[in-house]
Image (cartoon, helix red, strand yellow):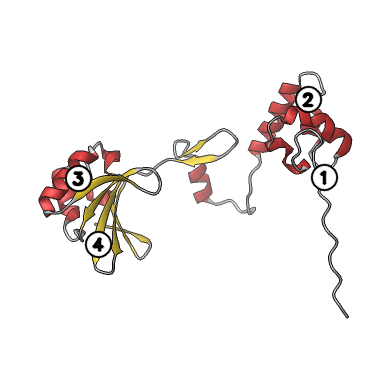
């Protein structure tokens, strides 16, 4: 007995923008697609969203739908004191357009040792600029103190960081706290085996 082949999925493409009907809202002009969607794919979008353009004061209806959608959240049904405390801190989470959340950047210095070519090391220092330290001056001071090459480069997240040749993690914390008193030792962290470990 041979297994039956599944039937191919029939995809409904929009006659206006050419995208699948589910993706019209991400296309170039969703407003032009709405009449076509109402006529050919009524079950794809909620009635509130598609009908908003035909009713009077359509912009207000769209805003109401947007507000309702942004107010929707996922919860497991249990409320805890920790959840209430995190909701009461308005400065920690910022809402971007489209309902995305942006967490406030933590002010900390992260030191990471990267091994390359099995014996050569590069120590990466990230986050000094958050304490008002000029990275070019800091790289010069680190290079002179440890008698090695140090440079300011852009990291993988497009943020500037200091790359210092060699393994200088043994006394870099003491040097940073002595040279720049604005940087507390409690704000310095090492990355060891993929985990963030406090230096203090």
Please give the residue where the numbered disc 3 appears in the rendered image: 139
In the drawing, does residue 53 fall left or right of residue 145? right
Q: Secondary structure at mark 4?
A: strand
Q: CA distance from mark 3 to mark 4?
A: 16 Å
Characterize the local packing of mark 1: few (<14), some (14-19) or many (20 or more) Cα atoms within 10 angstroms: few
114 on left or right of 92: left
Dot placed on the residue nearer the N-terminal end, 3 or 4: 4
Q: Earlier in the sequence, mark 2 or mark 3?
A: 2
**Residue at (16, 44) in percent of width and height:** 140
- Total label count? 4
Residue 94 x %, y %: 49, 36
The answer to which of marks 2 and 1 sits earlier in the sequence is 1
Q: Secondary structure at mark 1?
A: loop
**Rendering coords of residue 121 (x, y %):** 24, 62
Badge 2 element: loop
Residue at the limit of the structure toward the top, as seen here: 56
Quarter placement of the N terminus: bottom right
Residue 12 got which mark?
1
């Amino acid at each position: 007995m041979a297994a039956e082949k599944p039937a191919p999925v029939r995809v409904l493409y929009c006659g206006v923008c050419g995208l699948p009907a589910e993706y019209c809202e991400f296309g170039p002009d969703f407003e032009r697609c709405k009449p076509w969607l109402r006529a050919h794919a009524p079950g794809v979008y909620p009635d509130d969203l598609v009908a908003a353009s035909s009713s009077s004061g359509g912009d207000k209806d769209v805003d109401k739908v947007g507000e309702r959608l942004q107010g929707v959240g996922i919860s497991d049904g249990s409320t805890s004191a920790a959840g209430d405390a995190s909701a009461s801190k308005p400065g920690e989470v910022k809402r971007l357009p489209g309902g995305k959340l942006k967490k406030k950047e933590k002010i900390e210095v992260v030191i990471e040792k990267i091994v390359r070519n099995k014996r050569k090391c590069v120590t990466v220092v990230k986050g000094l600029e958050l304490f008002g330290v000029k990275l070019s001056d800091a790289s010069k001071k680190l290079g002179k103190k440890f008698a090695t090459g140090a440079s300011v480069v852009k990291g993988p997240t497009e943020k500037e960081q200091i790359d210092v040749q060699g393994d200088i993690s043994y006394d870099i914390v003491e040097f940073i706290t002595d040279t720049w008193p604005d940087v507390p030792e409690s704000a310095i962290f090492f990355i060891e085996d993929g985990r963030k470990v406090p230096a203090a």
